Amino acid sequence: MTIDYAALTDRNQTRVSRRAFRDPEIYAAEQEEIFKRCWLFVGHESQVRIPGDFVTSYMGEEPVIVTRGHDEKIHVLINSCRHRGMRVCRADRGNARRFSCPYHAWTYGVDGGLIGVPRHREGYYGELDLESNGLLTAAQVDTYKGLIFATFDPVAPSLLNYLGDMAWYMDTVLEADDGGTELVTGVHKWVIDTNWKLGCDNNAGDWYHVPVSHGSLARLNQNPALFDEDDNRLQISAATGHTLVAYLNEPSATMPRPTQQGTVLTAWREDVARRNHDRLGPVGSRLQFIAGNVFPNLGWIPGSFTIRTYHPRGPDKTEVWSYCLVDTAAPQEVKDAMRRQYTNSFGPSGLLEQDDGENWTGCARSVSNPVMGEQSFNYAMGSGHEWQHPELPGQHVGRGTSEVVQRSFYKRWYEQLTGSADAANVALLARESRF
């Protein structure tokens, strides 16, 4: 069976065929054209502070090891022995001088070089070229203000060009305080019976579901107007596929609207807001980044101190890896409060995460049904009513209750699959003078 890409979505991405969420052939094409070509988040510099530090991660379905080499550089190694393919590292994180395959003990340095082969002389007569049999590595590795990205594509545009104007929005989180950010030790991991795209298109900035699925939050906060529509609540396509929903405070506002009055966390946020005008500028300091997605699968929920990756595990399964991202310079009691808010909201047992997982699973069940499986998902809300914001960088914005971010996500998805993603046009979106 061949893929008729033109039948998967219409010209404006207002509809996406449910076949896209179940078809093994489409899933295989995604691994080739998206996860082997795009820049993917693999970790944070705080996880690999000193030489020998490592964490394991994934790039699509490919297991990788992120290491800090003795050369102080960050390396991203494919976690598969060159001999028979066994994983050479089975720990989540640690510090090591080498990685040794548990099958035949081929041994590699933390930079991926092959440094030891048992019976090299007797078995290979000294003829095996160690230099050409090191672990395979990502073609490019780069960081953006603490976040580590890698790509298998040697001709992919630079990371900064890939992010485009999304980097400006990321700065409102990554540079909210002078000390930058770090991850709380450990990663929450769980599997959901859903296609990876459904979590991503929700995280892209789906404000529409919030008062419905998460309405209990307004009751808990005793604030029935918490989710009201507001002209300052915006969906933003920063660059094709990179999106967010945000709240832009009025110029007269001195700080973001507090959500937890009287707590140590609120006091810290207010203090940071007072200090970040010069660092983020008159517009960036007014912006509250609520949720977003860096294409393809890096989700952000800054209000709950969360970043996460939606790792594909077949057409009908997603493994979510969820991290707690905190301000490095915050006092420990503030970091503890951030961690508790993350756990209670978007940790695997969090109140809001449970809502979302149930929705995504239910949507995924429909894609193979005999009647509804032949229909499309509808992403038409607000189509044709987007505009260019006079103060914000990026392509276009919509009201909070719009689906402009989903259309942006599926536009990039379609372009990647069909080979029509023009690297030159992506590069033009990067306004490097901003950074």
Image (tube, helix red, strand yellow):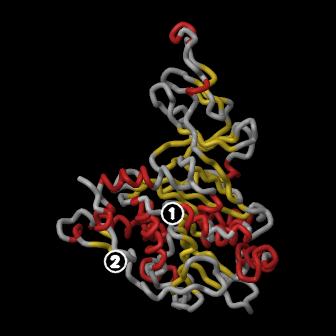
Q: Secondary structure at mark 1?
A: loop
Q: Quadrant of residue 373?
A: bottom left
Can you give x and y, in whole percent of width and height, for residue 401 in the image? 47, 85
Circle 1: residue type: Asp
Residue beneath the point at 27% across and 65% down:
367
Residue beneath the point at 62% across and 75% down:
289
Of the residues under marks 2 and 1, which one precedes in the sequence? 2
| Residue 364 as seen in the image, left or right of residue 207 | left
Name the foreground residue: 10 vs 120: 10
Task: In the rendered structure, find residue 409 and report the number of the disc placed on it.
Answer: none
Task: In the rendered structure, find residue 378 and report the number of the disc placed on it.
Answer: 2
Q: Disc 1 marks which residue?
A: 422
Pick out the residue farthest to the left: 370
Can you give x and y, in whole percent of width and height, for residue 340 in the image? 62, 65
Q: Secondary structure at mark 2?
A: strand
Can you give x and y, in whole percent of width and height, for residue 19 in the image? 28, 63
Circle 2: residue type: Asn
